[in-house]
Image: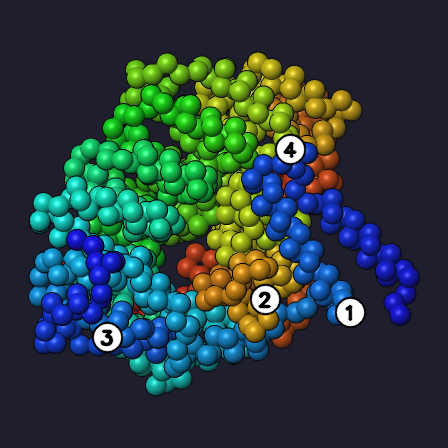
Amino acid sequence: MSCTEQNGALCMDAFNTSELAPSSEIAPVGCIPYEKDYEGYWRALRGAIEREEISDRGAVISDLIIDYNPGHYTAWEYRRKWSVQEGLVNEEIQYAAEQVVSNPKNYQVWHHHRRLVEILDKPVDALELTRNSLEEDAKNYHAWSYRQWIVKKFDLFSNEHEFVSKFIDADVRNNSAWNYRYFLIRETKFGPHSHFVEEPSLVQETSYAIRKSRLAPHNESPWNYIRALTRLARMPLVDVVGLVDALRDSNPQATIDNRFAAHLYADILAESDSRADKEAAAKLFQNLRDSDPCRRRYWDHKLSTIQKSISRS
Amino acid sequence: MEPVEESESYHRGLALRLEEMAPDDEFPTESSRAQREVEESLFAEDAVRDAAGLRHPPAIQKDRMRAYLRAAVNGKIEKYFVGLDSSQPWLCYWIIHALDLLSSSEEPVLDETTSQETVKFLKSCSNKSGGYGGGPGQVSHAATTFAAISALCVIGTDEALESIDRQSLYSFLIRMKQPDGSFSVTDDGETDIRGTYCALTAASHTNMLTPEITRGCKDFISSLQSFDGGIGGEPGNESHGGYTYCGVASLCILCDSNLDEMGKIIDLESLKQWASMRQMAFEGGFQGRTNKLVDSCYSFWVGALFAMLRWQPGEPSLMDPSRLNRYLVNYCQGARGGMRDKPGVRPDYYHTCYALSGLSIAQQAMCEEGEDVPSDLRLKLIDPVYNLHTRRRERVYRYFHGRPFLPE
């Protein structure tokens, strides 16, 4: 029941003037100058809502409103009620998919699709929809979040590793992709879906991240990922095979010029029981303080924490 | 003619700034190319100023900001804002809160008539079954409920606060409550940390933080902390400045800002790390996510985290407030008033509200570090948990705490 091709005036003909709600109250602050058409559509839909009328003509009007303002969550809610009542959820989900393409950063559109998938209890086109959307904008928060939900709800993990790897290959700095990768590892290794697929071990995964970190060492994402994996494995950072070597590799003169690597190395040393290691960590934090003045106060905080630990040991 | 020394120090400064650009490790990708474009647009701004002979940072143009905002009071905004038709209480809050920050007195932001009309208008956005919608006739939404109540707090008159129907608001909030402790944003809407923050703020202002409201909130927030220390909208989602703000501010409400208590629910050390890494050395402002671009709205969403995460007043904030101030003042002021996301985009009310809120936090931190912020440039102090001028929040607190609430 889409009206985009039709004339809005014809759609309005379905309503008598007496069925329109009165003009809306005017906001004294931030008043939007509405176009006459839009105002008419809203008066028609508001009238229908107030009469508790869920109808085809209301759905047509809701589409016109959404055309102007895809954030009109009341119109979206109306369409959900209408499509359920009329048994048109399968058709409505196509409409939702089209709207996702034109409004990829809109909460309501994605939510509409998600609710309809919930109602039908099958992941209609959702993987394709999120893939297409992420190919347009590889960091679209809604798309990644929706994909997590779909994959989890319908146990669709089997090709996801390959899926996310492509995004990391395309842009190793895509933090959304790294986040998704972590989600996959956590769910498949430790979640209720762990029986499902053969996943790389945490050790393999760590060496993957170390490899990726070498492509662009000043990329924060893989460094955060490595820390997270070790926490997931309940493994001290220092035991990560190859990690300390990798850090030392990039550290020929005992000071590391990369603040992410230096930070991680300093945190490893700070975990150690040895006083010498802790002092080395303090030295690194001192260097970070000098070389990264934007975060001076944060490095001061790290420095004072390690100094307290040294004076206790 | 400028003295040579000054020119040399200027160039030394420039060289230092060049060093602070995000290194692309000679491995450019889409992210690093977009980052470089922003850095270059900042340089272009500097070049324009240099050509005009303006070396020193311009100040915040308070009059111009006020004029931009005042034009939206009892006047129409631009047509293309129809996309905000479901955010009318937001528009109202953004505009009057920003005006409040800019005002040099404690006088009401709106004249008596406009204030009465605004209270009446916000009432027309409310629904019998509780809460406020995005406009008259629209269904209630947690976010517009937050915005409407915050706007009423800025107005601050007895009439404004009396207009909040607590019984129906309470039943709306309870209706939004989900089994896992979170809140849905509408009857049939999405559930994420925005719902929790908006619901808790509404309940906190109106003295309705009952055990039924707070049940399960801490567990829900705890489930949102991501592996890098920040907070996402739903469990498993990427850390994000806006959601991290909602999570931390919610915890402040639940734990009465007691950091020992908050530290039992989320890991504050990794949160501090995540938040500190969001400040962009070269630009000075904050990004909202790792490897994304600077945006002035995060001056508040992320900047407020540092204000909320201090162990005690007087302890230095972990951010660099002068850099944040520099980003906002040098690069985000629109030529005809208003604040923008970044150079190259037009100002809007949302960014004006949050950039100025962030500037207030930066100024506060600068003053605490002993930097001189001339009093005529000062913005009003804000309470970072509610994003209201501290006096407005105190007034609302006193008003409702004198009126205990009993659910019917």
> Can see residue A252?
yes
Compared with B236, B3 (above or below) is: below
Judging from the image, what secondary structure is the residue with disc 3 in?
Answer: loop
Q: Nearer the viewer, mark 1 or mark 4?
A: 4
Q: Is residue B128 left or right of residue A149?
A: left
Sooner in the amino-acid sequence: mark 1 or mark 4: 4
What amino acid is found at the position of numbered circle 3 in the picture?
Ser
Residue A24: assigned label = 3
Label pair 3/2, CB-CB below 8 angstroms: no
Q: Residue at x 46, y 79 (%)?
A: B71
Crowd band around label 4 with a 10 angstrom C-alpha radius: few (<14), some (14–19), many (20+): few
Residue B333: assigned label = 2
Residue B27: assigned label = 4
- As rendered, which of A132 and B296 lies closer to the eye? A132
Q: Nearer the viewer, mark 3 or mark 4?
A: 4
Compared with B25, A137 (above or below) is: below
Question: Circle 1 sits on which residue?
Answer: B53
Cα distance in 3D space between marks 3 and 4: 55 Å
Q: Is residue B368 left or right of residue B392?
A: right
Label pair 3/4, CB-CB below 8 angstroms: no
Cα distance in 3D space between marks 3 and 2: 34 Å
Cα distance in 3D space between marks 4 and 2: 33 Å
- As rendered, which of B319 and A138 lies closer to the eye? A138
- As rendered, which of B173 and A78 lies closer to the eye? A78
Residue B291, image x and y in percent? Answer: 55, 41
Crowd band around label 1 with a 10 angstrom C-alpha radius: few (<14), some (14–19), many (20+): few
Q: Using the image, name the chain to which the residue with label 4 belongs.
A: B
Cα distance in 3D space between marks 3 and 1: 51 Å
Cα distance in 3D space between marks 1 and 4: 37 Å
Respond whether the residues carrying marks 3 and 1 are from the same subunit. no
Q: Nearer the viewer, mark 4 or mark 2?
A: 4
